[in-house]
Image (cartoon, rainbow, N blue to C red):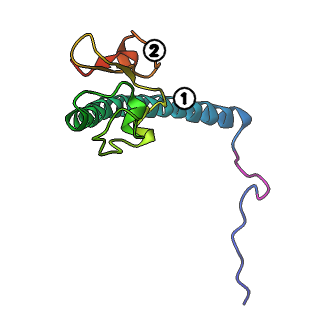
Amino acid sequence: MQHRQPRFAHPHRHRGFTLLEMLAVIVLIGIIGTIVVRQVGRSVDKGKYGAGKAQLITLGQDIDSYALDNGSPPPNLQDLVSRPANAPNWQGPYAKPSQLKDPWGHAFGYQYPGQHGSYDLIFYGQDGRPGGTGYNADVGNWQ
């Protein structure tokens, strides 16, 4: 006895996706991808901005440690990394070279003597320039 397999009404007819359906799916994937990338980008910027503010505090503490050892804040931030000639009680390094740059790779603003205290230390935000709003807003150690 032979077993017969059932025959379909149209054995050569296979249902596939049309070009229009495939294009619609690709467009939807593109839209969703764009939304996800924008949200992740905002989160990264927010994280870097928060890290820059935290780094400002840490760098301020490093400057204070230098001032305790040497009687005054350093004339420039590089003196936290390598011993200057005019700092006989230097106990550093007080900071690593990488700590002198914010999360976006910009140098922190520094002024000694400062206008708001013995020194002014400024995180310029994402754009690395004075002024700005949002993630470009400046934050100073006196705030």
Q: In the depicted view, which residue is nearer to us: 87 or 58? A: 87
Residue 86 in sight here:
yes
Q: Position of residue 137 (x, y in %)?
A: 35, 15
Query: What residue sits 32% from the left and 42% below the top?
Result: 94
Q: In the depicted view, which residue is nearer to us: 140 or 71? A: 71
Q: In the depicted view, which residue is nearer to us: 55 or 7? A: 55
Query: What residue sits 39% from the left and 10% below the top?
Result: 132
Q: Position of residue 95 (x, y in %)?
A: 36, 41
Nearer the camera: disc 2 or disc 1: 2
Which quadrant is home to the C terminus? Answer: top left
**Lower sequence index among marks 2 and 1:** 1
Decide if residue 18 is on the left or right side of residue 66.
Answer: right
Question: Secondary structure under badge 1?
Answer: helix
The residue that label 2 is drawn on is 129
Farthest residue in the bottom direction?
A: 1
Q: Amino acid at mark 1?
A: Ile
Which quadrant is home to the N terminus? Answer: bottom right
Residue 43 in sight here:
no
Which SS does the magenta portion mostly show?
Answer: loop
What is the number of the mark on residue 31?
1
Can you say whether 141 is above or below 12 in the image?
above
Question: Secondary structure under badge 2?
Answer: loop
Q: Which residues are magenta?
A: 11-16
Based on the picture, tell me whether residue 114 belongs to the magenta stretch: no
Query: What residue sits 39% from the left and 19% below the top?
Result: 124
Based on the picture, tell me whether residue 14 belongs to the magenta stretch: yes
Q: Residues within 10 Å of mark 1 (few under 14, many from 20)?
A: few
